Image (tube, coloured by chain):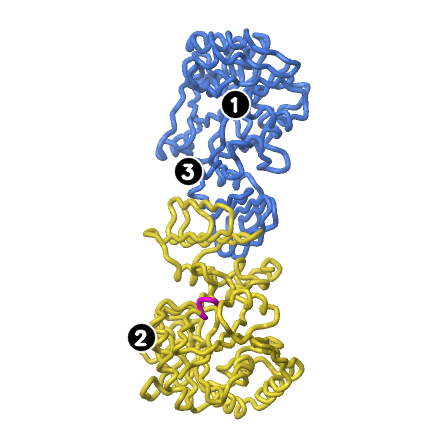
Chain colours: A yellow, B blue
């Protein structure tokens, strides 16, 4: 038995400006080590005994980046338009047999513990084969208010029924979730049989299901590239798999996992995922000189950076842009004028 | 009557790295407005009714910078070697008549109130004509521990006898000095007749006086450039005018003045001298975007800088170098590895 990875390459990563830009967004940047987040995602799905040839879903503007960074056979599914995750996954589901188990993975996350990931995927695969639509539930490590949570229900042989999805909580609820052990972050990693997903989509979003089917019926198919037709696809309203399917189906399951997961949602999250020295400082790229600094991250693509007497600061140099922020304010980088983030 | 300005161009300004560098140090940088500190120094000494043609004392490595930035007739005195201020001033004193009043000015300071400066110079000139060696005493505006102080003694018609020079005090003493009104910062601005200076130098530093005289006797003299002979000059031990002359003579006087003076001794001092907006932020050079910032200074020679959520931070971009520091740590910039300051 094998699983077909579906790697989703949407998402702008505006909070990682100036490294992540419209022209080369977050998944295609080597933010952790020499390989890009996209390549690292594929590396986790490379065991031929367990994984089939992956399907990469990406917009046409990123097709060249995908092709450049791919170093194994894959099917490239060109999204005719950005319509969030549910339609993107549905395109992939049409490219395989109904009984094929798909493993949907974002292309811009970090997973520190590959073995834990592999174990969780194996559990999820078993549940998917029984007809469940499975979400990997990330064991929370902090009272995060920026994530959606999954509350587990009755136990299954390889996970739990999902009791409910919880919208981003306030700090008090997030703290309670962290303590009770029954809540997990929704990390956007899913497993299900392709046919089961399409059945549920048909049940809850019939227009979307129909438009995707039409788009795929009229697709231009090359040796390794599928270009679904644009016209039907453009009639779809963008919607996430969570809203369109997972929160509606009665067959949602969760496999809890602790695997050092991060969505690398900001420069401070990236700093946490990078190695640091005894003072908590980390330097990436060009050499930097840090004097009297603590918990400072420097990432420069060329210029030398000298930092004197700062704490909890983040400095990024990319091309003609310099970003200076603090760990506490790193989330606000996405709020910089779009003009500055070009 | 007129005064001959002597403008000293020594000093590296290492604490203003990366803008100030060995190749183009602090005096020759446009740190406040479009004209360099050197040019602004000469601008203060430009009234032909009051000032004669200035003498610029500089090392040979900076002769080209001086020539490029000069926009009026001047005599360029090339220091054969860097030997601190006493020998440099003695060279200039040999280039004029003994009764000429010299006004010695550093080339890298900021004076906000030109009228107060002019008034103080007029007072100092009168005292100099009476044979006094005069120091302008900057009225302190903060309990600075990084400056030498001058304690005033008996009053004179145009100033005070200097009671004593006080080495850099600790904070308690500096606070007392600020309160008592009898102590002034030694800002390195002096007035005296050339002959009186050379007499006192002869009395207290006979070797230095003799070596300078020899060096000037064998000088190569062009239309506007004087190149004192190197061999005698090189035998001199470097010493400041304060140690060599002012602290020894019995004819030292001080003219107190409040003129918005700053030695621009660090990026935070420069920040204080620059205009800022309602949030205390100041941007110089290339455009910058500041979000949720207070008392942040950005100075970039090209790259765009975005700052998010910082307070009391200083960011300087120059060529291939980026400096990030805090107002509290700006003094430490000079401690960066010499290699980084190249």
Of badges 2 and 3, nearer the viewer stands 3
* Label 2 element class: helix
Q: Which residues are magenta?
A: A38-42
Q: Looking at the magenta stretch, what is its main secondary structure?
A: helix
- Marks 2 and 1 belong to one chain: no
Which residue in the protein does label 1 denote? B189
Task: Check the residue under mark 1 and report the chain it is in.
Answer: B
- Local packing at callout 1 (Cα closer than 10 Å; few below 14, some 14-19, many 20+) is some
- Marks 3 and 1 belong to one chain: yes
The picture places residue A58, in percent across and down from the top left corner, at 56, 73
Task: Check the residue under mark 2 and report the chain it is in.
Answer: A
- For residue A191, what is the image quadrant? bottom left
Reply above or below: B207 against A83. above
Q: CA distance from mark 2 to mark 1?
A: 68 Å
| Label of residue A179 in the image | 2
Q: CA distance from mark 2 to mark 3?
A: 48 Å
A98 and A256: which is toward the camera: A98
> In the image, is residue B146 part of the stretch drawn in magenta?
no
| Label of residue B337 in the image | 3
């Amino acid at each position: 038995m094998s699983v077909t990875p579906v790697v989703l390459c949407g998402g702008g990563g505006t909070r990682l400006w100036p490294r992540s830009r419209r022209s080369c967004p977050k998944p295609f940047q080597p933010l952790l080590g020499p390989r890009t987040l996209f390549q690292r995602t594929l590396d986790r799905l490379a065991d031929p005994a367990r994984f089939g040839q992956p399907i990469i879903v990406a917009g046409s503007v990123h097709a060249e980046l995908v092709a450049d960074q791919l170093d194994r056979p894959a099917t490239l599914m060109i999204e005719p338009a950005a319509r969030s995750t549910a339609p993107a996954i549905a395109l992939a589901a049409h490219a395989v047999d109904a009984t094929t188990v798909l493993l949907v993975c974002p292309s811009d996350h970090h997973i520190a513990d590959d073995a834990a990931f592999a174990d969780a995927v194996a559990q999820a695969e078993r549940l998917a084969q029984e007809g469940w639509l499975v979400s990997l539930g990330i064991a929370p490590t902090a009272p995060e208010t920026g994530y959606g949570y999954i509350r587990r229900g009755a136990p299954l042989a390889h996970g739990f029924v999902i009791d409910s999805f919880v919208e981003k909580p306030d700090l008090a609820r997030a703290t309670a979730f962290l303590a009770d052990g029954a809540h997990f972050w929704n990390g956007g990693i899913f497993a299900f049989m392709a046919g089961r997903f399409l059945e549920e989509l048909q049940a809850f979003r019939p227009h979307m299901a129909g438009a995707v089917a039409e788009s795929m019926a009229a697709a231009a198919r090359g040796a390794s590239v599928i270009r679904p037709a644009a016209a039907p696809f453009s009639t779809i309203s963008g919607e996430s798999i969570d809203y369109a399917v997972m929160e509606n189906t009665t067959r949602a399951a969760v496999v809890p996992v602790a695997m050092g997961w991060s969505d690398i949602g900001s420069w401070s999250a990236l700093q946490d995922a990078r190695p640091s020295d005894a003072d908590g400082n980390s330097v990436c790229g060009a050499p930097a000189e840090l004097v009297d600094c603590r918990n400072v991250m420097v990432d420069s693509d060329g210029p030398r950076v000298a930092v004197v007497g700062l704490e909890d600061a983040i400095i990024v140099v990319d091309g003609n842009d310099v970003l200076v922020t603090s760990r506490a304010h790193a989330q606000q980088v996405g709020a910089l004028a779009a003009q500055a983030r070009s």
